[in-house]
Image (cartoon, helix red, strand yellow):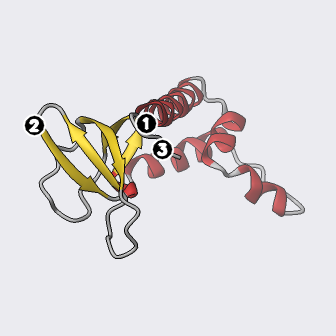
Amino acid sequence: MFKLGQRVVIVADSFEQGLPLGEYGYLIARDRNPDSAFSWVLRIPKIDKHIAVVEEDIALEEQLLEEEANRISHEALLDFALATRNEALFRQLMGMEDAEEANDEPAKESMEEFIRKVNIKAWI
């Protein structure tokens, strides 16, 4: 997945090494030693150090930006569905569409009942 020289972001600190979370680094070596828990050597220019890290502690910047964009668009669609009281879109976004299709006879609920359920979930 990763290649030498790639710019990555530190997203975790599994071995509690004091890694600067959210900072950028560059992959400068791969540790192929089977006795080592670490898989990459990372050069962090901000602190001017080389640090061995596991693959779970780093992520590509493009991947993080894509995940954030998907999350923001999902939240925006959810806000739009609530503002326009679009029940079908809300159910689709919340994943409630499958539960309704599983029932042979879906129960019709009033608009007030729907708003009450949304308000209850909003408090949770």
Q: Which residue is mark 2?
A: 47
Q: Which mark is residue 93?
A: none
- Mark positioned earlier in the residue sequence (2 or 3): 3
- Check contact, mark 1 vs mark 2: CB within 8 A: no
Q: Given the current orientation, which residue lies at the most extreme right position?
A: 104
- Check contact, mark 2 vs mark 3: CB within 8 A: no
Residue at 72% from the left image edge and 37% from the top image edge: 88
Could you tell whether 62 is left or right of 14 in the image?
A: right
- What residue type is disc 1 on? Leu
- Mark positioned earlier in the residue sequence (1 or 2): 2
Q: Which mark is residue 64?
A: 1
Q: Nearer the viewer, mark 3 or mark 1?
A: 3
Considering the numbered disc 3 on the image, is that residue within a helix, a strand or a loop? loop
Q: Position of residue 89 (x, y in %)?
A: 68, 34
Q: Quadrant of residue 112 in the image?
A: top right
Q: Position of residue 46 (x, y in %)?
A: 13, 31
Alpha carbons under labels 2 and 3: distance apart = 22 Å
Q: Quadrant of the C terminus?
A: bottom left
Residue at 89% from the left image edge and 62% from the top image edge: 104
Q: Which mark is residue 2?
A: 3
- What residue type is disc 2 on? Ile
Alpha carbons under labels 1 and 2: distance apart = 22 Å
Q: Position of residue 74 (x, y in %)?
A: 55, 33
**Residue nearest the observer in this picture, 26 or 56:** 26
Considering the numbered disc 2 on the image, is that residue within a helix, a strand or a loop? loop
Could you tell whether 97 is left or right of 111 in the image?
A: right
- Mark positioned earlier in the residue sequence (3 or 1): 3
**Residue nearest the observer in this picture, 96 or 30:** 30
- Vertical placement of 30 versus 27: above or below? below
Could you tell whether 105 is left or right of 14 in the image?
A: right
- What residue type is disc 3 on? Phe
**Residue nearest the observer in this picture, 63 or 8:** 8
